[in-house]
Image: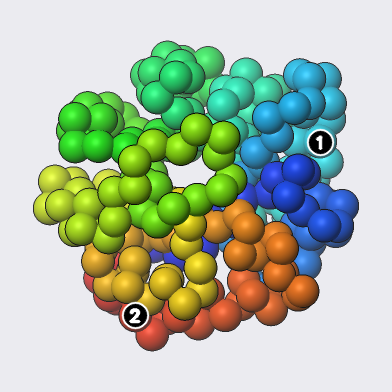
Amino acid sequence: MFPPLYAILDPDVARTPLLTLAESLADAGVRLMQLRDKRSGAGKLHAQTRELVALLAPRGVRLIVNDRPDVAAMAGAGGVHVGQDDLPVEEARRVCGAGLWVGVSTHNSEQLRRAVATSADYIAVGPIFPTATKENPGPVVGVEFIRAARGLTQKPLVAIGGITLERAGEVFAAGADSVAVINDILKAPDPAARAHAYLEVAKRVRPRSR
């Protein structure tokens, strides 16, 4: 079953060192994380990814690298996530190899249909709600887009964009397999407790078939 919580580790948002944060989230039960670092150069990103993999892999946590399939492959990460302006899914897979996950972001029906036809291991849809994380976010698509997407694919769907604990239930109910969260976890007084609360919502709301 696809992990219900996809925690995004962003050094620009985190209030504690990423290793400390990642360890606490893993201890809370999070099994899927993404390193999203838009500022660091390749060398620092590679080193940071290797440190996170060394910490998380023994705990059964898959680490995804944002944007960079080369770094994901070289550092032993569990996959890469690409956006519409990054390498296409199949090109990213050629770089990182068949054993790693490749996820892709989609923001409208046309992008979704194209993603469904690829070998993507999961498809992110959003922004579901208004978000302040991205500088130029796409138009808000709402939970109805999740329902529409669910009718088009059996691939795991990851909802992203402005998701909070209070909204997670309706997102799961609309058909999302997982919620990707940045601010609502990283800026919480206790990120681990907040993550655990998301997992409890998923247990109650997410259909067992997913």
Vertical order, 3 against 64 (above or below)? below
Who is closer to the viewer here, 168 or 192?
168
Residue drawn at 70 percent across, 45 percent down: 10
Residue 115 appears left or right of 162:
left
* Residue 1 screen position, x and y as percent: 39, 62
Who is closer to the viewer here, 7 or 32?
7
Vertical order, 42 against 129 (above or below)? above
Looking at the image, which residue sits at the far left? 151
| Mark 1 closeness class: few <14, some 14–19, many ≥20 residues within 10 Å | some
Vertical order, 159 against 165 (above or below)? above
From this viewpoint, is residue 26 visible?
Answer: no
Residue drawn at 39 percent across, 18 percent down: 88
Q: Quadrant of residue 192?
A: bottom right
Identity of the amino acid at label 1?
A: Gln
Residue 144 appears left or right of 123:
left
Residue drawn at 35 percent across, 61 percent down: 177
Residue for badge 1: 48
Distance between mark 2 and mark 1 Cα atoms: 35 Å
Identity of the amino acid at label 2?
A: Val
* Residue 105 screen position, x and y as percent: 40, 36
* Residue 136 screen position, x and y as percent: 50, 33
Vertical order, 159 against 10 (above or below)? below
From this viewpoint, is residue 165 visible?
Answer: yes
* Residue 172 screen position, x and y as percent: 33, 69
Residue for badge 2: 205
Residue drawn at 78 percent across, 26 percent down: 40
Q: Are marks 2 and 1 in contact (CB under 8 Å)?
A: no
Residue 40 appears left or right of 102:
right
